[in-house]
Image: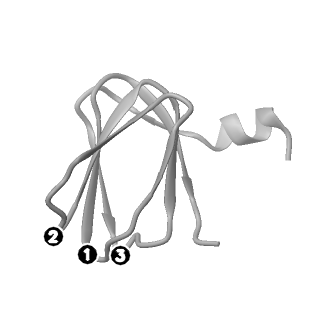
């Protein structure tokens, strides 16, 4: 799969919009540009993921991903 294919699969989020995920443990978010805030149910720390970075969700339950500015990201499936 080429770069163009990946970019066309990217999800765009407006600034301050939320993505709600259920039972995302083992999935990853890859931020293409901008910055997102991630919080997982029952986890005391929040995560900030910037352009070119990824984060693997390590909790079941509700996970929130909030775009802090207009953002493009990819949600990757479990391995």
> On screen, 65 above or below 70?
below
The label on residue 23 is 3
Labels 1 and 2 touching (C-beta < 8 A): yes
What secondary structure is marked by label 2?
Answer: loop
Labels 1 and 3 touching (C-beta < 8 A): yes
Badge 1 crowding class, 10 Å Cα cut-off, few under 14, some 14 to 19, many 20 or more, is few
> On screen, 49 above or below 38?
above
Badge 3 crowding class, 10 Å Cα cut-off, few under 14, some 14 to 19, many 20 or more, is some
The label on residue 61 is 1
What is the x, y in percent for residue 74? 55, 46
Residue under circle 2? 42
Q: Nearer the viewer, mark 1 or mark 2?
A: 2
Q: CA distance from mark 1 to mark 3?
A: 5 Å
What is the x, y in percent for residue 34? 43, 24
Q: CA distance from mark 3 to mark 2?
A: 12 Å
Q: Nearer the viewer, mark 3 or mark 2?
A: 2
Q: Residue at x 85, y 39 (%)?
A: 2
Query: Does 58 sit left or right of 53 as displayed?
Result: left
Tell which of 60 and 20 is nearer to you: 60
Query: Does 9 sit left or right of 70 as displayed?
Result: right
Q: N-terminal of the two: label 1 or label 3?
A: 3
Please, which residue is most extreme toward the front here? 45
Tell which of 54 and 16 is nearer to you: 54
Tell which of 41 and 45 is nearer to you: 45
Tell which of 3 and 60 is nearer to you: 60
Q: CA distance from mark 1 to mark 2?
A: 8 Å
Q: Residue at x 71, y 41 (%)?
A: 6
């Amino acid at each position: 799969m080429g770069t163009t294919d990946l970019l066309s699969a990217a999800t765009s989020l407006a600034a301050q919009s939320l993505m709600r995920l259920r039972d995302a443990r083992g999935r990853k978010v890859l931020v293409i540009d901008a910055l997102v805030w991630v919080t997982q149910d029952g986890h005391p720390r929040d995560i900030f993921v910037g352009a070119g970075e990824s984060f693997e969700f390590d909790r079941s339950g509700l996970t929130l991903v909030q775009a802090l500015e207009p953002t493009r990201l990819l949600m990757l499936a479990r391995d």
